[in-house]
Image (tube, rainbow, N blue to C red):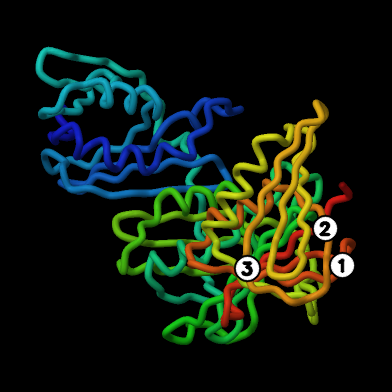
Amino acid sequence: MQLVNATRDELLKPLQVVSGIVERRHTLAILANLLFRKSGSSVSFVSTDIEIQITTKANFGVGADDVTTTVGARKILDILRALPDGPVSLNLKDNRLVVQSGKSRFSLQTLAASEFPIMQTNAESLAGWKMTQKAFRQLVSQVYFAMAQQDIRYYLNGMLLVLEGRELIAVATDGHRLAFSQITLDQAPSGSGQKQEIIIPRKTILECQHLLEDSEEPLEISLSANQIKLSFGDIELISKLVEGKFPDYQRVIPKGHKNTLVVSRETLQSALQRAAILTTEKFKGVRFSLSNNKITIQSTNAEQEEAQEEIETKYDGEAVEIGFNVSYLLDVLANIKTAEIQISLGDANSSAVITLPGSDSFKYVVMPMRI
């Protein structure tokens, strides 16, 4: 029975969308598979890892039959990538999915669709709103790099999303640095209007960064008690939320630092990249020395090698010497796109705050290092 007739690229596009979350190692064999649903000409592909579920739709079904089955995600994706451009058909024969293109033919094992663990969506939405894909992607891109990885404090392995009125705030921290970003929605969200605080898992955030486009196309977001749903284009992403209490980020952000300077982002980024060459994997420390109209950046390593960079900038505050993990500074400079950044410092033992000149929408707090 023929199910699909499409070009290689038409088939690849939805399969690439859903395959990103399929784990190579899994406890359930069915989780290595995609759920294939066909209803007339409408075809949908679903993938899940129990925590996240992605669905995408396309219109290249053949015949009026309704068919559901599952097939190995990696195998069908690798086959399509290896095939030359041209028409591809998918056929179901004796519980095998047959991929055919020109003189190439592949017969793949299927598993029963009834075994596939579909995530149930919660009917009651606590809040919902619309925004552009670009706006949400930029909000996330300014903080996601500060999320923890496999921290025993599981609530840090994700991004805090706060909705209060029309203000949408994203926060991420790994205990050594914290990133905060805020935007105002064009329209008030639906729902009770109460403040909502959720923690979105790290894997979900990275998948959003991968799937969302820098476009004005609409994105719909809906929150329920333990899920978030994002709908955009032909894609629907549902994710469980991380349970736990996120740290009070307001207390972490220092206020009243008197030593402030504005510096070119690219100039500082280039200087730090050069200084980082002589740091080691274990010790990524660089020393910042601020004096009259000048920043001096130094790094050394166990071989007694030394790098020194000087940047001229307007600065008439106190002389300050402070150490930082250079990776934490390079991360933030790579993910914000303004021409200049503002750095506020206290003393050698106080966290530094990086902001955007003339704006309160972004803050990055980084703890000092002993050097």
Q: Is residue 369 visible?
A: yes
Pair 3/2: label in front = 3
Q: State the image coordinates of residue 364 (x, y, percent, origin top left).
A: 67, 65
Quick one: SS at disc 1?
A: loop
Seen from the viewer's position, the closer of residues 329 and 194 is 329
Residue 47 lies left or right of residue 84; in this view the side is right
Q: Residue 311 carries which label?
A: none
The amino acid type, in three-letter code, at marker 1 is: Asp
Q: How crowded is mark 1: few (under 14 residues within 10 Å), some or many (20 or more)?
A: some
Task: Indicate the position of residue 28 as horizontal and vertical percent values.
Answer: 56, 28
Residue type at numbered disc 2: Ile
Cα–Cα span, label 1 and label 3? 19 Å
User: Between 1 and 18, which is closer to the camera in this rendering?
Assistant: 18
Total count of labels: 3
Q: Residues within 10 Å of mark 3 (few under 14, many from 20)?
A: some
- Residue 192: image quadrant is bottom right
Whether residues under marks 1 and 2 lie with C-beta atoms below 8 angstroms apart, the answer is yes
Looking at the rendered image, the quarter that the N terminus falls into is top left
Mark 1 → mark 2, Cα distance in angstroms: 7 Å
**Amino acid type, mark 3:** Thr
Which residue corresponds to mark 1? Answer: 347
Q: Which mark is residue 322?
A: 2
Q: Quadrant of residue 359?
A: bottom right
Q: In this view, does 304 lie to the left or right of 43?
A: right
**Placement of 104 over or under 366, stated as above or below:** above
Above or below residue 165? Residue 357 is above
